[in-house]
Amino acid sequence: MPRKMTQLSDFLRHGCDTVIDVRSPAEFAEDHVPGAINLPVLDNEERARVGTIYKQQSPFLARKLGAALVFRNAAAHIEGPLAHHEGGWKPMVYCWRGGQRSGSFAWMLQQIGWRAEAVEGGYRTYRRLVTAALYDAELPFKLIQLGGHTGTAKTALLPKLAARGVQVIDLEGLARHRGSLLGDMPGGQPSQKWFETELVQALDALDPARPVLVEAESSKIGQLLIPPAIWEAMKFARWVEVAAPLEARAGYLNAAYDDILSDGPALKDKLSPLRYHRGHELVDRWEAMIDAGERLALCASLAADHYDPAYDKSMRAMAPQVIERFETPALDDAALEALADRMAERLQTMSI
């Protein structure tokens, strides 16, 4: 009998030795159950080929070809990456909807003597549960937003606070984007679905009885949307702010954005749209700084003349409840460690 999964914890704490996703590599790359390995019984090309025959010729011919391919590929997996498993091995297998791909593969593993289980409803069951948690339900956590002008090392503080026992969700880390005009990171962003899978994993590890710190963001981080359950909780969250002198922030930005600051042409392309918001004169001045290699001056001007006014305007519009403001004269490693000590001590005594 297929294994019935009714809540996210069934997928996150399944009790099996291995989770096997038998969907195609393209399906797996977009999203998958956390911890799953991909052993496709149909690769991308084979899946497309079977689907085309199903639609254009006949379901019978498609099933006949699909069966041959599935069993051939399954045999290769059994002789290859699965060959080392002993008799007591217990895998959990799923495909898109808990149909023939996972059922056939699980049956083969069972015939060998392994304790294989197929997931009823497959990946679609998992995805429905993720959607319910992030789109339909109210977030069962009280959030605190971490705000402050650009360059106050908010992202760098999150892991330091987590190491001191503060509950945090690093939204920018999960989204692989620094959350600003210059926020692109090497390797690009994950899919929206994988971002949400990482979010439910992060939430699952947290205690609802304690507050959770998140960095203040807009509703999008790069190209990814913050799911409604989290975004609604953020809108009603209290805030703590970090403040530092402009000179210290410029130095931090110079180091944190070294990749884009080192690529003058790409940086100019990123800044070009700001001509319509900040004027040609200011952007021309930035481009002159880029050409002259004046990175610290550029970072200071970007903060003071672009990011700070935008942040201040947003704060006036939102008027959040700022319950604590932490000031630091510097943002080097020693200063951040000291700041994290102060913040963690205060955050861990806050009630929700």
Image (cartoon, rainbow, N blue to C red):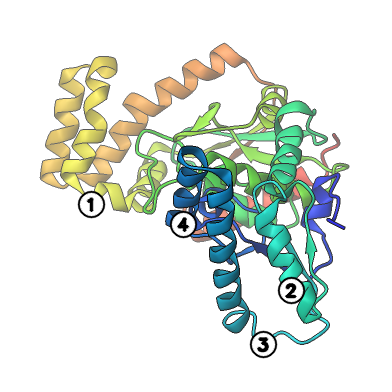
Disc 1 marks a residue whose amino acid type is Ser
Query: What residue is shown at x 62% (from left), y 53% (from top)?
Result: 32
> Of marks 1 and 2, which one's residue comes earlier in the chain?
2
**In this picture, residue 290 sits left or right of residue 57:** left
Disc 3 marks a residue whose amino acid type is His
- CA–CA distance in space, label 3 to label 4: 27 Å
Q: Is residue 245 above or below residue 188?
A: above
What residue does disc 1 label?
262
- Which quadrant holds residue 184? top left
What residue does disc 3 label?
84
Mark 3 or 4: in front is 4
Q: Is residue 349 above or below residue 10?
A: above
**In this picture, residue 213 sits left or right of residue 204:** left
> Of marks 3 and 4, which one's residue comes earlier in the chain?
4
Q: Local crowd at mark 2 within 10 Å, few (<14), some, or many (≥20)?
A: many
- CA–CA distance in space, label 1 to label 3: 48 Å
Mark 1 or 2: in front is 2
What residue does disc 4 label?
46
**In this picture, residue 304 sits left or right of residue 76:** left
- CA–CA distance in space, label 2 to label 4: 22 Å
- CA–CA distance in space, label 4 to label 1: 43 Å
